[in-house]
Image (cartoon, rainbow, N blue to C red):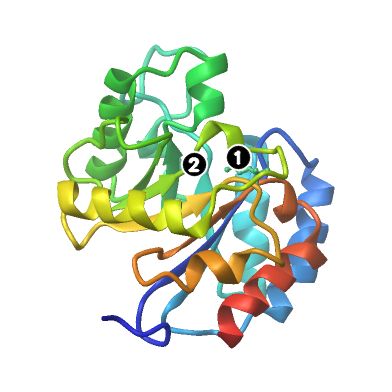
């Protein structure tokens, strides 16, 4: 059994289609100085593409223990793919890329095949792919070591899954894809319920949407993770 002090805990902010550059920088200036440097806690912020450069710069200048991620990436290399952000260019800003979020599957026709292509692009460019699965049936491409279980009914609804069910899905995913695959939970996570998820041995953190937009609410979530 891995203790909370030793297991990795990822706390990932998914801002979705929110925040201007100025709002993003304000958030960084509030959250950054409050973060403690801890070996096992990984705090990641995933802004819109247009904020990535400024956010990365602010984090570097402030020397904050914050990792930058993207919410998506192109399934192709660089070249004639209008409107897409390829991994080979994104890698100057990001270390993690969310792939296969249910909102992309639903609104942008993201298929399991596209997820495979995006994962390949990420890995080829030394970016960690964070693949979102909506349940046990969603396939996880080869090479993926970071997975978020995000049941659709729980996203943005204030109606999270139970920690017990999330943990049983995590157990299934670890059996299928290996014990070294880290499983996160996402869907209506807030500072009141985060402890119940990360105190499960096989849950390695949380992907936070709505509650990540307000810097104070997000700091509270991180505080719960660091004081456990
Ligand atoms: P939510 O979103 O925290 O607003 O439910 C989570 C997500 O979609 O990643």
CB under 8 Å between callouts 1 and 2? yes
Label 1 environment density (alpha carbons within 10 Å; few <14, some 14–19, many ≥20) = some
Q: Is residue 174 above or below residue 209?
A: below
Residue highlighted by disc 1: 154
Where, by quadrant of the figure, is residue 64 drawn? Answer: bottom right
Left or right: 156 as drawn, with respect to 5: right
Q: Residue at x 75, y 38 (%)?
A: 18
Where, by quadrant of the figure, is residue 19 drawn? Answer: top right
- Labels in figure, total: 2
Q: Is residue 112 above or below residue 202?
A: above
Q: Secondary structure at mark 2?
A: loop
- Queried on whether the Cβ of the residue with tag 2 lies below 8 angstroms from ligand 1, the answer reads yes
Left or right: 88 as drawn, with respect to 46: left
Instruction: Name the image quarter holding the C terminus.
Output: bottom right
Label 2 environment density (alpha carbons within 10 Å; few <14, some 14–19, many ≥20) = many
Q: Give ligand 1's quarter of the image.
A: top right
Disc sitting over residue 150 in the figure: 2
147 or 58: nearer the viewer: 147
Disc sitting over residue 133 in the figure: none
Q: Position of residue 201 (x, y in %)?
A: 36, 72
- Queried on whether the Cβ of the residue with tag 1 lies below 8 angstroms from ligand 1, the answer reads yes
Q: Is residue 53 above or below residue 154?
A: below
Q: Residue at x 27, y 19 (%)?
A: 113
Left or right: 67 as drawn, with respect to 120: right
Q: Residue at x 26, y 81 (%)?
A: 1
Q: Secondary structure at mark 1?
A: helix
Where, by quadrant of the figure, is residue 11 drawn? Answer: bottom right
Query: Mark 1 and mark 2: span between their CA atoms?
Result: 7 Å
Residue 193: in sight, yes or no?
A: yes
Q: Position of residue 120 (x, y in %)?
A: 24, 34
């Amino acid at each position: 059994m891995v203790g909370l002090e030793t297991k990795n805990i990822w706390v990932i902010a998914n801002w979705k289609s929110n925040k201007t550059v100025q709002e993003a920088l304000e958030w960084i200036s509030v959250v950054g100085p409050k973060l403690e440097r801890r070996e096992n806690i990984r705090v990641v912020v995933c802004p819109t593409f247009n904020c990535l450069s400024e956010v990365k710069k602010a984090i570097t200048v402030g020397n904050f223990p914050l990792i930058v991620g993207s919410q998506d990436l192109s399934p192709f290399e660089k070249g004639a793919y209008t409107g897409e952000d390829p991994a080979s260019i994104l890698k100057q800003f990001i270390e993690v890329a969310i792939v296969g979020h249910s909102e992309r599957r639903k609104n942008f026709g993201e298929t399991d095949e596209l997820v495979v292509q995006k994962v390949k692009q990420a890995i080829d460019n030394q970016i960690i792919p964070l693949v979102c699965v909506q349940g046990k049936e969603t396939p996880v491409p080869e090479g993926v070591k970071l997975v978020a279980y995000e049941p659709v009914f729980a996203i943005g609804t204030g109606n999270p899954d139970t920690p017990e069910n999330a943990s049983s899905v995590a157990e299934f995913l670890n059996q299928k894809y290996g014990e070294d695959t880290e499983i996160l939970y996402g869907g209506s996570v807030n500072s009141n319920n985060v402890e119940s998820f990360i105190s499960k041995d096989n849950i390695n953190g949380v992907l936070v949407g709505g509650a990540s937009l307000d810097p104070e609410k997000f700091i509270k979530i991180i505080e719960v993770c660091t004081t456990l």
